[in-house]
Image (cartoon, rainbow, N blue to C red):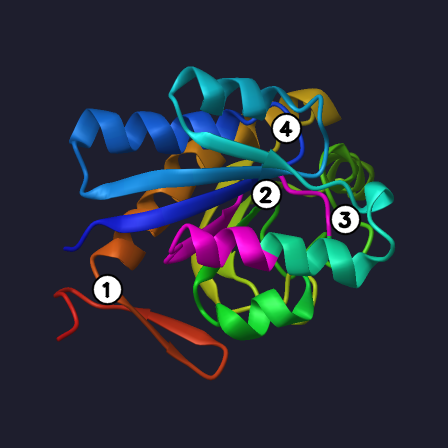
Amino acid sequence: MSGLKIAVLISGGGTNLQALMDDISEKQLPMTISLIISNRSNAYGLVRGKQQGIKTAVIDKATYPDRNAAGMKVLQLLEEEGIGLIVLAGYLEMIPEEVVRRYRNRIINIHPSLIPSFSGKGYYGERVHAAAYSRGVKLTGATVHFVNEETDGGPIILQEAVAVAYEDTPKTIQEKVLKLEHRLLPMAVRLFAEGRLRVTDNRVEILSEVQL
């Protein structure tokens, strides 16, 4: 493997960011989180990054003349850092289409449900778990997927389910799913870095050996 440069985009506490940083450090993986971008200046994930000496940036669309200007700033930072993989770890902002085009099958997102259930426009964060609770599902889970122009519609890389008990609440469901997220996201990043993900149309094949 080569030294993969990663950008992580966040909006909140950054627990998935922390899981990824820990995985890279503990396994001494040949990859680096080179940049953390948030759309919120008070996101605690920025603090996590700064504590590790990682470059951080805040790009709040409210401070730009329009959404396109903010998107071009994101793209500029990614290209300046030579980013090879973008990881969306609780990023509550639309990815500009130009970024999706430039980084086709190089943007990974973690979603707190078993896509296509409770996914798409309006399903994010605690809303996902509240919807799963209200529907009375017996299984929920987490999904890691590549990002395309459709919200939560890109090729699925990994999924894992967890049982929902009658006694569960939206909060306890969220806690169960978060444990899956912390394992699945670093795993998907490792598979990408090892060249073991092959995308055909909207399907992902996980190869047993590194692609040549």
- The residue that mark 4 highlights is 174
Badge 2 crowding class, 10 Å Cα cut-off, few under 14, some 14 to 19, many 20 or more, is: some
- Mark 2 residue element: strand
- The residue that mark 2 highlights is 139
- Asked if residue 91 lies in the magenta stretch, the reply is yes
Say which of marks 1 and 4 sits in front.
Answer: 1
- The residue that mark 3 highlights is 123
Asked if the residue under mark 4 is in contact with the one under mark 2, i.e. CB atoms within 8 Å, the reply is: no
x 32%, y 45%: residue: 187
Checking the image for residue 204, the label placed there is: none
Type of amino acid under label 4: Gln
Query: Quick one: 4 or 70, which is closer to the camera?
Result: 70
Type of amino acid under label 1: Arg
Checking the image for residue 196, the label placed there is: 1
> Which residues, given as a range, are shown in magenta?
75-93
- Asked if residue 94 lies in the magenta stretch, the reply is no
Say which of marks 3 and 4 sits in front.
Answer: 3
x 70%, y 63%: residue: 151
Could you tell me how far apart the alpha carbons at marks 3 and 4 are, in whole angstroms? Answer: 13 Å
Q: Extreme bottom residue here?
A: 201
